[in-house]
Amino acid sequence: MRAEWTKLRTTPGAAWLLLVTVIVTVALSAAVCAAATTCGTKVLLSGVYAGQAPVAVLGVLVVSGEYSTGLIHTTLAAVPSRATVMAAKALVVAVVVAVFGTAMSLVGLAEGLELPAAARAVTYLVLIAVLSVGVAAVVHDSAVAIGSVLGLLYLPPILAPLVANPRVVEELAPMTAGLPVLTAWSIGALLVGTLRLR
């Protein structure tokens, strides 16, 4: 855990990605709220869907960055248990995203966001980060992993109207189906990533 925390905080751009997440989420939510006639919970949370992109990139870089530099060999020499390595990576990223997500939610709470909705937004971002860690462990390449995660998040809502039964796509897509389905996607990606690492 300590080693993963050190790697995360010394990864170039990690702090910027988290800062961009907070700024984009808060700014977009404020802009939508200003344009809307009523500023309800759904409007206040609209920025989360844009703010998830930098979180996804961060989750990918935690794993794929080590593959691109070859440092994954050092990591696995120090900690041979692949499951431990993956759990540590996912947990460190999840905690960091939760802290920044909570800070973002405090702004939303000040604007009238309800506490359960704020908690769901933070949980959503944490699960996106874990999903990204898992996908990066499966494909290893940064560009492919980022494209895969963002495609998995943003393409189903766009393609849903083009299929015969769009409701099925919405109920299975990680971004639109809700937290239980996103949790299943995240755990599944992490398990497959761990098996691939083994």
Image (cartoon, rainbow, N blue to C red):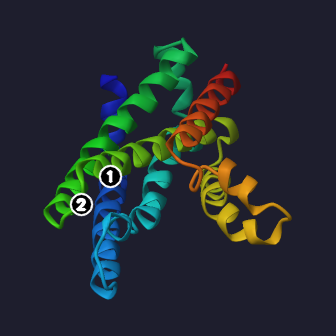
Query: Residue at 53% across / 19% down in the picture?
Result: 76
Residue carrying label 2: 113
Give the image location of residue 5, x and y in percent: 31, 32
Other-residue count near label 2 (Cα within 10 Å), few / some / many at <14 / 14–19 / ≥20? many
* Mark 1 residue type: Ala
Q: Is residue 75 visible?
A: no
Q: In the picture, which quadrant includes the C terminus?
A: top right
Residue 64 drawn above or below residue 187: below
Q: Are marks 1 and 2 in contact (CB under 8 Å)?
A: yes
* Residue 72, position as x, y percentages in the image: 54, 30
Taking the spot 29% from the left edge, 53% from the top edge, the residue there is: 15
Residue 16 located left or right of residue 144: left
Q: Reply above or below: 172 against 153.
A: above
Picture mark count: 2
Dot 2 lies on which element? Answer: loop
Q: Is residue 186 left or right of residue 144?
A: left
Q: Looking at the picture, how far across and down is residue 153, in whole percent?
A: 60, 57
Could you say whether the residue bearing mark 1 is in a helix, strand or loop? Answer: helix
Q: Is residue 72 above or below residue 54?
A: above
**Crowd rating for badge 1 (residues with CA inside 10 Å; few <14, some 14–19, many 20+):** some
Residue sitting at x 69%, y 41%: 139
Label 1 to label 2: alpha-carbon separation: 7 Å
Nearer to the camera, 47 or 150: 47
Residue at point 50%, 43% (across, down): 179
Q: Which residue is mark 1?
A: 117
Give the amino acid type for the residue marked by disc 2 in the picture.
Leu
Of residues 113 and 1, the one drawn nearer to the viewer in this rendering: 113
Q: x and y percent of residue 135 in the render?
A: 62, 41
